[in-house]
Image (spheres, rainbow, N blue to C red):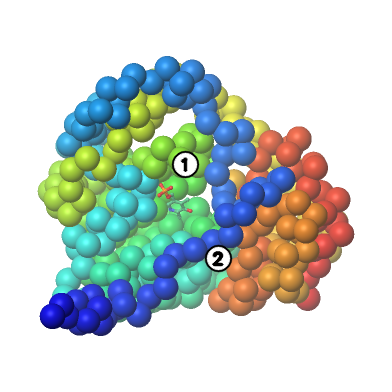
Amino acid sequence: MSRPYSEVVRPGIAAMKLYSSNREPCAIDLSDNTNQRGAPPSARTLVPEANIELFARYPNHYAADLKRAISAHLGVGTDEIVTGCGSDDVLDSAIRAFAQPGGAIAYPDPTFVMIPYCGQVNDLALRPVPLLGPERGWDVDADALLAQRACITYVCSPNNPTGTRASAEAIERIVAEAEGVVLLDEAYIEYCGGSFVRRAKDAGRLLVIRTFSKAFGLAGARVGYAIGAPELVAAVEVSRGPYKVTQLAERVTVSALENDAAWVEGGIREVLDARARFMPFLERLGLKPIPSDANFVLVPVKDAAAQTKALRERGVAVRPFPKLPGFGDAVRISVGPWEIMERALPSFEEVLSCV
Ligand SMILES: *Cc1c(COP(=O)(O)O)cnc(C)c1O
């Protein structure tokens, strides 16, 4: 007789719920920080013409063409790059690679929800560390993170869902003093600059994680990568396994890197312009949006669930964050071109209010 589910599945995984978020279609969807303008121009021409061979054959094992294109884009060696099926996959593979038995993962709280998720999947003890307060610009607490002596320390900058950045000093200290591996998630770095990618190799224990899902507009292609010292990157690649980036995804991503730099830059400028107009709009409503370095804004509100529901009834989707540590109830609003934001303003004006 086969063993019951509870005995074959690791207890940590059996105790978990499937990750979910509201994916109901919605007229103005500002709920997930993807590029509001959609896929870049060359992807639109590539996809319908895609050769059937792209689907009939396996891709190359570890996306060598993509590594060459990333290498040219960032000026790092191809042996310093590991790719994956979205940066979620790269993070998961890295955590799997470095999760010592009985170990812990330390991370700022609040941060990217996939981190406690992947930590739990890998049986790590979760060590959330509160962000420093508004008077410190919501910086990460380097002392408290280091004090966890975790085998993995994760920092997200700009941070999801707060939009705030970790200071360079805090990151430097964590990288210099952490006992284990440091994962620095730069999913939104294109919106503010100050990347650590060129520092990763010499830092030795630092992996900088990047994605094509946000500024590059390719969330559906599922392509992310990490930059680090070759030995570190090799361990993540073993953990990851082959064939994680599809042929079509690899072609589309290489094409975007080679042809769409101006489109990406234009989109970033559009987001920064729209955010600069959106913040004072929110403040005029009496709200206190958290200053953001990313393509979204966290807005503390009276009742995140109720206001998210009311916005959806008006055709506007945002992401609710009830009882967010340090912030209370809040909603996260993605920022796209002003023409799109403008259409949502009357609904925000009707619905949003803070305590
Ligand atoms: C959106 C996001 C990612 C990107 O995930 P993909 O799997 O590459 O789509 C990674 N980290 C953070 C913090 C994010 O917000």
Q: Is residue 338 left or right of residue 335?
A: right
The relative height of residue 123 versus residue 273 in the rendered view (above or below) is below
Task: Examine the rendering and report whether any part of residue 175 can be seen.
Answer: no
Q: Is residue 287 left or right of residue 97?
A: right
Residue pointed to by mark 2? 138
Which quarter of the image is occupied by the N terminus? Answer: bottom left
Instruction: Name the N-terminal-most of marks 2 and 1.
Output: 2
Query: Label 2: how many residues lie within 10 Å, few (<14), some (14-19) or many (20+)?
Result: many
Query: Label 1: how many residues lie within 10 Å, few (<14), some (14-19) or many (20+)?
Result: some
Q: Name the spot of residue 165 as percent of width and height, x first.
A: 51, 56
Q: Name the spot of residue 44 as percent of width and height, x first.
A: 51, 23
Task: Examine the rendering and report whether any part of residue 219 can be seen.
Answer: yes
Say whether marks 2 and 1 touch (CB < 8 Å): no
- At horizontal 17% and vertical 54% (from top left) the residue drawn is 239
Amino acid residing under circle 1: Ala
Q: Quadrant of residue 263?
A: top right
Tell me, for residue 219, which label it has, or none. 1
Q: Quadrant of residue 221?
A: top left
Closest to the camera, between mark 2 and mark 1, is: 1
The total of numbered circles placed on residues is 2
In the image, farthest residue toward the front: 1
- At horizontal 20% and vertical 37% (from top left) the residue drawn is 62
Tell me, for residue 284, which label it has, or none. none
Q: CA–CA distance between discs 2 and 1?
A: 28 Å
Amino acid residing under circle 2: Trp
